[in-house]
Structures are given as C-alpha cells and as structure tokens.
Image (cartoon, grey):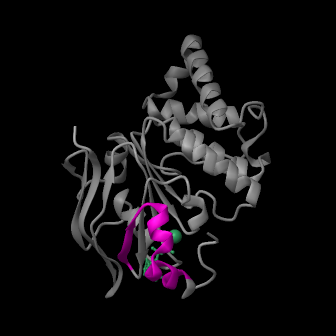
Amino acid sequence: MSDIILETEGLTKEFRGFVAVSDVSLRVRRGAIHGLIGPNGAGKTTCFNLLTKFLQPTRGTIRYEGRDITGMKPAEVARLGLVRSFQISAVFPRLSVLENVRIALQRQRGGSFDFWRSETLLRAYDRRASELLEAVGLAGYEDLTAGELPYGRKRALEIATTLALDPVMMLLDEPTAGMAHEDVDRIVALVKRVAEGRTVLLVEHNLRVVQGLCDTITVLTRGRVLAEGDYASVSRNPEVIAAYLGTETPAHA
Ligand SMILES: Nc1ncnc2c1ncn2[C@@H]1O[C@H](COP(=O)(O)OP(=O)(O)O)[C@@H](O)[C@H]1O
Ligand SMILES: [Mg+2]
C-alpha cells in the first residue's frame, strides 16, 4: 500500500475561459488530516468538487489508492471509500436524529426496504446508529427531529451520516462555516476524532481551524498552490499572509 492515498497531477478547471483551478498537484498522505485552505474565491470548493467527481476537470488527473479515478462518477468513487460529507447523506429535518443515521446505514448496505422486515437487522442498525451518534457527541439527542437541532449539532449529525458510509477518506468543505466559536471548537475536536483510522481532506477558509488539526496544509490562491507545509511554516509565509490580507483579516493566528 502506497503512503500516498490521493494524488492529483496538473488538475485544472476552467469555466468559460476563467481558470478557477490551475495546474494543482496535490499529494495526500494516508492517515493524514490535510488542510486545503485559501481566501474566498481561491478555488477550494471547485477543487473539492473535482476530487469528489461532482465536476469534471478540464485537464489533469486524479489518482486514489493507485487508481485513476479521473473519469469516474461520484457514486463510484464513494463506493471506493472516498466520501464527501453531504454526498449521499442528506439530513431529513422531520425525521429523528436516530432515524437519519439509520437510513444512512441502510443505504450503505445498499439494501431494499425488505431489510426492514427483519427485527434483528433493525436492532443491529439501531446499535450502530447509537455508536455513531455517540462518536459525534449526539448521545441523548436521538429522539429529537433533525430540524430541532441547533446548527452546530446539525453539522455533527451530517458527519455521523457520512461516517455511516464507512469512508476510507473523508472530504469536508468548511465544516465550521457560519458557526459560533464554541461550535467551531466542538467540530474541530470532532474532526480530530473521526480522523482516527482514516484520511481527511479538510477544505477551510479559516487558518485558525486548521491550526493544531492538520498535519499538512496546502494554500491555494487564485486557483494555484501558493504554499505547502505544516501550520507553523505556512502561517509565517509572507506570501500566505499577503494573500489573506489582500482579501480580509488574516489568519487570526
Ligand atoms: N460554476 C461556476 N461557473 C463559473 N465560475 C465559477 C463556478 N464555480 C466557481 N466559479 C469561480 O471560481 C472561483 C473559485 O471559486 P470557489 O472554488 O468556490 O472558491 P472558494 O471555495 O475557494 O471560495 C471563483 O472566482 C468563482 O466565482
Ligand atoms: Mg468554498
């Protein structure tokens, strides 16, 4: 097994002549929490959509587990264990928290609704659903409807439904976007926990979120890789500081 789980070469995406992602070569180490950061408009989400096959690149290749996945469909890469949060999982606001995770588990099995006739299987799903809810800090919230959850807890539920798909590598696009401070800290701790035994690629705007969380950070600006390294080195990099200053307040570091 190679040390590199995901690798892109010359990844490029153009939208009617506008280059949103330009010649990005990315190497993500197995087991790492890799941050892809940059100011607004840097091309992070476009990159994320390319990696999970929601967008087809204009040029370049993507290899996952040594296999060329450039031409694959989102569902195919998800079956290989490369899963984005909110991909197959959606949160159903009127269903309970427990039911949401149970449905995600049932989809993972690819089962028809016949499965529901088996009491034993149902109980097995409930057990696993409870474990996942516990893992994301939602024990005790099982019977609330998803719609009743506060915003930060909703993101935790989305992560639980993603975990139900048993990802080998998980991709998260700004999991803390729009959150209050205490929720941010909780999600950061949660990402750390779910990263145990898997690889995580975290797309993030806020440098503070990736501090202490990411082993390696790739900084994008205007679609290109500007810098790469650990938090200490990228946060000191004058070009990185200038890129953040050019748009808004810097790294809050
Ligand atoms: N579907 C699209 N059509 C045209 N331009 C797009 C499209 N998606 C993104 N862009 C442009 O590409 C650039 C990068 O966007 P995005 O990847 O969303 O950046 P980020 O996630 O880093 O904020 C932006 O200038 C954006 O306007
Ligand atoms: Mg974005």
Would you say 28 lies left or right of 111 here?
Answer: left
Would you say 48 lies left or right of 183 here?
Answer: left
| Residue that appears at 60% across and 35% down | 101
| Residue that appears at 52% across and 38% down | 163
Picture quadrant of residue 62: bottom left
Would you say 182 lies left or right of 86 here?
Answer: right
- Quadrant containing the N terminus is top left
Q: Which residue is nearer to you in this view: 187 or 56?
A: 187
| Residue that appears at 51% across and 70% down | 235
Picture quadrant of residue 182: bottom right
Q: Give the range drawn in magenta.
A: 223-244
Determine if the magenta segment contains residue 82: no
Q: Which residue is nearer to you in this view: 80 or 200?
A: 200
Query: Where 101 falls versus 76 (above or below)?
Result: above
Where is residue 113 shown, x and y percent of the image?
A: 52, 27
Where is residue 154 shown, x and y percent of the image?
A: 69, 49
Q: Looking at this rendering, what residue extends furthest in the top direction? A: 120
Where is residue 249 shown, x and y percent of the image?
A: 63, 81
- Quadrant containing the C terminus is bottom right
| Residue that appears at 38% across and 78% down | 223
**From this viewpoint, is residue 218 visible?**
yes
**From this viewpoint, is residue 91 visible?**
no
Where is residue 132 shown, x and y percent of the image?
A: 60, 31
Query: Where 142 falls versus 219 (above or below)?
Result: above
